[in-house]
Amino acid sequence: MIEVHQLTKRYGPTVAVSEISFEASKGEVLGFLGPNGAGKTTTMRVITGYLPPTSGKVTVAGYDVEEESIEARRHTGYLPESPPVYPEMKVSEYLAFVGRIKGVPRGELRKRVDEVSEKCAIADVQSRQIGKLSKGYRQRVGLAQALIHNPDVLILDEPTAGLDPKQIHETRDLIRGLSGEHTVVLSTHILPEVSKTCDRVVVINAGKVAAVGTPDELTQRLQGFESVLVTAEGPREEIKARLERVEGVSRVEESDGANGRATFEVHATKEKDVRAELARAVVESQWRLLELRTSGMSLEDIFLKLTTHEEQIKN
Ligand SMILES: Nc1ncnc2c1ncn2[C@@H]1O[C@H](COP(=O)(O)OP(=O)(O)OP(=O)(O)O)[C@@H](O)[C@H]1O
Ligand SMILES: [Mg+2]
């Protein structure tokens, strides 16, 4: 549903993201986890067509965000880091206004406004002015406007930032409820957030993908289980299938790929050093092994920079 391939974005001399690749498949909630300045917002702004990539390719629902931007945007809803505010507007007016911009047919506007208001639990404030709403309600209005044209893909930049614990719970439930029907990418720098809301996580640090996996796999790695990054030249699908068959391997994720090369993140089931067997599998299949390394340490360093506590939030 979303494919980000070798994306690089520079702001003048600053490289905000460098050759990052990842995918989100239909109906999944993908977490984009990284410390401040990692490049989360930048990546999301490219996916949503607000910023052109410096290089690389991004597609949403099969449409190139640069070359077919109108189609791509039609399939995308976006909650920006700081949502645009029209404090004077009433909630229902604002949602209808965004709906018109997003091409919702006039005859359906009223119904759509009611539907998203219901979904985002703002039906009771429809006739209130946005400027007079609490932060939590305003955030939900932001979510509602992202949903107004019923997009396949939702890009949510720190959707729970600045909310109180109760509001955080409600927003997470809402996002979980959107999965299946919508493909969601949400960014966060809060570690527990991803395990509560996301099916899969891309960890990004200093503009690069540092790890990809399910929340459980990332937690295991933090507890000392290693994962190994294998870069090889050869047929991707075959390499992936071969690595999956190595004893002790629980899961293989493709984390990067270009020019016939592919990098895989290999997760092992137990605390077992699978490196030698992985190397042997690649070489015996006559593929070129370009790199093989553990990524445990650097991930730990990155996680130290993340917010790991949510003292006030009960489960
Ligand atoms: N408009 C801009 N001009 C110049 N540099 C920018 C601009 N926007 C972002 N950057 C830089 O790009 C890098 C990535 O920033 P980005 O906002 O994408 O990170 P982030 O992961 O969203 O961080 P945060 O968690 O603080 O929101 C940072 O070094 C930032 O200073
Ligand atoms: Mg940001």
Image: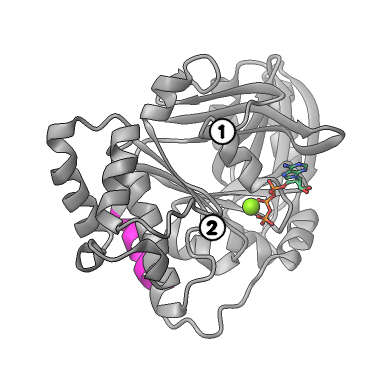
With 254 as the anchor, is 107 left or right in this view? left
Looking at the rendered structure, the secondary structure element under dot 1 is: loop
Closer to the eye: label 1 or 2: 1
- Quickly name the residue at label 2: 158
Q: Would you say the beta carbon of the disc 2 residue lies within 8 angstroms of ligand 2? A: yes
| Quadrant location, the C terminus | bottom left
Nearest the eye: 116 or 2 = 116
Structural crowding at the residue carrying mark 2, measured as other residues with C-alpha within 10 Å and reported as few (<14), some (14–19) or many (≥20):
many
- Quickly name the residue at label 1: 50
Going by the numbered disc 2, the residue's amino acid type is Glu
Please identify the quarter of the rendering in which residue 226 is found: bottom right
Residue 104 visible in image: yes
Magenta part of the protein: which range?
168-177
Looking at the rendered structure, the secondary structure element under dot 2 is: loop
Q: Residue at x 71, y 16 (%)?
A: 286
Going by the numbered disc 1, the residue's amino acid type is Tyr
